[in-house]
Image: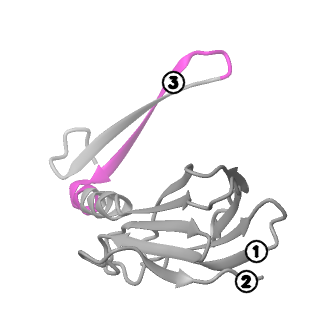
Amino acid sequence: MHDHDPFLIRCSVYIYNLNNKRCKTSYQYPKKKMKNLSIFLCVVCMISHVYGDIRIANELKFKKKLWISCFSGDDQMEPVIKNPGERHRINFNTNIWGTTRFMCTLRQGPNYRHTQSFTAFKQVSPSDNGALWDWRARENGIYLKVWAGEHEQGGAYMHKVHDWIY
């Protein structure tokens, strides 16, 4: 194999050793493999741009705070406490298998006895392009509107999904 072989692509990588001197490492790859790798990377990049978005707003009355804790199969979020009128937002990339799920638990202050745990985001297939799941905690329950994705509710208004557990 020559340096000028028309069927090879030469890649050079520069690294620094412990003495801070630059070292060059070269690799040769067949062009066909590089083309396949390029196509694969483009597909992975397109898939990785699928997003999910959860918004939880505290619309409780009487100055009640809202305790929020959410998790997925990969992430455990730190619990947060939101004052009335405040919102909590979670942005994330969905997985390539189309199985991303987020579970959340909400608790009403001041004693945090009224609670509810639920699926706050659910991706149903790899073609599901993500969405904003907009949740509202109110005195009489927890409301939802989904914006976009396979669960999109179009012109539907916020609707009650869960009651508080006492």
The amino acid pointed to by label 1 is His
Identified at 36% across, 67% down, the residue is 131
Distance from Cα at disc 1 to Cα at disc 3: 62 Å
**Dot 1: few (<14), some (14–19), or many (≥20) neighbours within 10 Å?**
some
In the displayed structure, 53 sits above or below 117; it is: above
Please state which amino acid type lies under the numbered disc 3. Answer: Cys
Disc ID at residue 114: 1
Query: Residue 4 at x, y = what percent?
Result: 19, 39
Q: Residue furthest right?
A: 111
Confirm whether the magenta stretch covers residue 23: yes
Determine the CA span between mark 3 and mark 2. Answer: 63 Å
Question: Which tag, 1 or 2, sits closer to the chain's start?
Answer: 1
Residue 130, x across and y down, in percent = 36, 69
Q: Which residue is mark 2?
A: 165
- Mark closest to the chain's N terminus, 3 or 2: 3
Q: Which residue is mark 3?
A: 23
Q: Amino acid at mark 2?
A: Ile
